[in-house]
């Protein structure tokens, strides 16, 4: 009986954290972006200017320019900028990181140089882009593992205490 308890505990400790895996990605803040709006037409102020990632991805913006920039959620024409994330000033050589948990599209810009814009697309995992099949596979993530572990514990308790349910 103790072996079953130990096995269930090992499953809980090992499998559950592994299912909440984080991913990493990076975006460069391109040198010379502050000098003018030429990077807007080339879509090169942030490299890449649009990045598509999975939920639980940590994106790090790396300032390779020689002047300070920000990474501020929203767009310059909105009144609610910086609500989701706001880096404040990122000096030359500095970085800013943010973890994107929920699916969606997140626009951002530099509040010092508002022509510098970018976009993060957080796509649900297993989404298919086939034109003949627009279905997506549901993501259960750690919930399935948690339900399994709880089921094992309940089964062990019922077996140990010889409880019988009659319908």
Image (cartoon, rainbow, N blue to C red):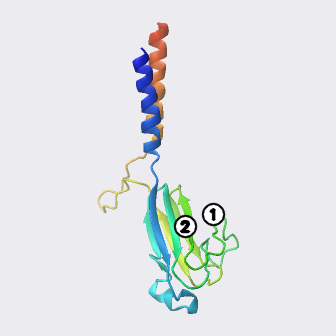
Q: Residues within 10 Å of mark 2 (few under 14, many from 20)?
A: some
The answer to whether residue 151 is above or below residue 118 is: above
Residue occupying the far right of the picture: 79
Q: Are marks 1 and 2 in contact (CB under 8 Å)?
A: yes
Residue occupying the far front of the picture: 93
- Helix, strand or loop for disc 2: strand
Q: Residue at x 65, y 75 (%)?
A: 89
Q: Earlier in the sequence, mark 1 or mark 2?
A: 1
Residue occupying the far left of the picture: 132
Q: Quadrant of the N terminus?
A: top left
Q: Residue at x 64, y 68 (%)?
A: 86
Q: Residues within 10 Å of mark 1 (few under 14, many from 20)?
A: few
Q: Residue at x 43, y 66 (%)?
A: 52
Q: Position of residue 53 (x, y in %)?
A: 44, 62
Would residue 61 be visible to someone looking at this image? Answer: yes
The answer to whether residue 159 is above or below residue 72 is: above
- Helix, strand or loop for disc 1: loop
Q: Position of residue 32 (x, y in %)?
A: 52, 89
Nearest the viewer among 109 and 4 is: 4
Q: Which residue is mark 1?
A: 84
The answer to whether residue 17 is above or below residue 67 is: above
Q: Position of residue 43 (x, y in %)?
A: 46, 83
Q: Which residue is mark 2?
A: 106
């Amino acid at each position: 009986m103790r072996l079953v308890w130990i096995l269930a505990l090992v499953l809980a400790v090992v499998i559950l954290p592994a299912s909440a895996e984080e991913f990493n990605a990076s975006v460069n803040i391109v040198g010379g972006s502050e000098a003018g709006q030429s990077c807007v037409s080339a879509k090169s102020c942030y490299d890449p200017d649009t990045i598509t990632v999975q939920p639980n991805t940590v994106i790090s913006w790396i300032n390779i320019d020689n002047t300070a920039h920000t990474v501020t959620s929203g767009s310059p024409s909105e009144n609610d900028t910086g609500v989701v994330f706001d880096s404040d000033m990122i000096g030359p050589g500095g970085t800013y990181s943010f973890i994107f948990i929920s699916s969606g599209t997140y626009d951002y810009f530099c509040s010092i140089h508002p022509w510098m814009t970018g976009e993060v697309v957080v796509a649900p995992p297993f989404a298919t882009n086939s034109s003949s099949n627009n279905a997506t596979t549901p993501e259960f993530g750690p919930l399935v593992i948690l339900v399994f572990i709880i089921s094992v514990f309940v089964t062990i308790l019922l077996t140990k205490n010889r409880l019988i349910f009659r319908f």
